[in-house]
């Protein structure tokens, strides 16, 4: 595999915090593509252009676990174990009826829904803003109206125009204007913690599936069949998979938490490597809470 250049030139006045955030994001992307090689700390550090000590310290600070532990979260064995461990957690999450709200670290997500007909009546003449921003998972595109976020995508092909066009297929009837300054607060809240309000357009079935996705706790995964049963539609796993694939708001509506039977990670709109990266990140973020539970 072609060696990925991790570190890039940065201007002297970049803040250390921004530099560290961007660098670790690139390391995570590299690991999502090379985890099968079980790279050593020394190799990862060499790819990042850092000493092993510096990488270990920086990575642990931003991700919450060591590079070695993070690579373990990327494996198929971990995905299988997560499926087994998630069942009781999911039972509680769905029974408590978390409709309309989901927790991601310090992020609180609320939403309002519209059918395609509602969107058409309100969307004609509506102006939406979009912007490109850094995230722990690479460059992301966010589209929002004055009422909230209606699209979030990752640039999985390094083709901004293609990513924007793909996301805008679900935003027909509206004018989309680039305005990164307007979008920046949404990006900061989405990946740094805060309140984010979503405006979702979909069929009643799609909206039902997307609302169910927001009930899946961080660090847990579910199969398409399990999700179908939990929304009261057993036997509709294929239809559920179609609705999951059409999710317009990645990360905030965690479609990445649905995997195939046996733990196989595939079929992600923004590339399976990106899905694996996000799941491993969430597993790492959940590690401190699991350690606390074990100690109590």
Image: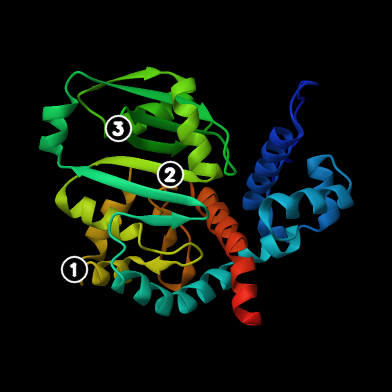
Which residue is under mark 2? 195
Which image quarter: residue 214? bottom left
Q: In this view, does 124 lie above or below 64?
A: above
Answer with the quarter of the image where residue 14 lies. top right
How many residues crowd around disc 1 within 10 Å: few (fewer than 14), some, or many (20 or more)? some
Circle 3 residue: 147
Image-based side of 119 in relation to 161, left or right: left
Q: Which of marks 1 and 3 is nearer the N terminus?
A: 3
Q: What element carries label 2?
A: strand
Q: Which residue is drawn at 77% across and 25% down?
A: 9
**Residue 237 vs residue 250, the one in the foreground:** 250
Of tags 1 and 2, the one toward the viewer is 2
Residue 287 visible in the displayed image: yes
Q: Distance between the residues labelled 1 and 2?
A: 31 Å
> Mark 3 falls on what kind of element?
loop
Give the residue number, with chain letter if any, for mark 1: 233
């Amino acid at each position: 595999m072609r060696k990925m250049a991790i570190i890039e030139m940065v201007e002297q006045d970049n803040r250390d915090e921004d530099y560290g955030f961007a660098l670790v994001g690139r390391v995570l992307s590299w690991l999502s593509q090379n985890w099968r090689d079980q790279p050593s700390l020394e190799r990862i550090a060499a790819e990042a252009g850092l000493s092993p000590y510096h990488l270990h310290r920086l990575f642990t600070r931003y991700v919450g676990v060591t590079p070695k532990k993070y690579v373990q979260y990327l494996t198929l064995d971990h995905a299988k174990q997560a499926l087994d461990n998630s069942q009781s957690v999911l039972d509680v999450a769905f029974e408590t009826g978390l409709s309309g709200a989901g927790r991601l670290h310090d992020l609180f997500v609320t939403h309002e829904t519209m059918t395609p007909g509602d969107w058409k009546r309100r969307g004609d003449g509506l102006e939406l803003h979009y912007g490109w921003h850094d995230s722990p998972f690479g460059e992301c595109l966010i589209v929002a109206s004055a009422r909230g976020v209606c699209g979030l995508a990752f640039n999985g092909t390094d083709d901004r125009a293609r990513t924007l066009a793909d996301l805008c297929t679900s935003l027909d009837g509206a004018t989309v204007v680039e305005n990164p300054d307007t979008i920046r607060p949404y990006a900061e809240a989405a990946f740094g913690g805060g309140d984010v309000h979503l405006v979702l357009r979909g069929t009643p079935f799609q909206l039902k599936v997307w609302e169910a996705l927001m009930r899946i706790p961080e660090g847990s995964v579910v199969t398409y069949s399990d999700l179908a049963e939990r929304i009261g539609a057993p036997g509709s796993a294929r239809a559920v998979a179609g609705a999951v694939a059409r999710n317009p708001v990645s990360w905030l509506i965690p479609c990445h938490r649905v995997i195939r039977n046996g733990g196989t990670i595939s079929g992600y709109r923004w590339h399976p490597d990106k899905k694996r990266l996000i799941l491993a990140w969430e597993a790492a973020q959940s590690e401190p809470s699991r350690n606390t539970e074990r100690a109590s």
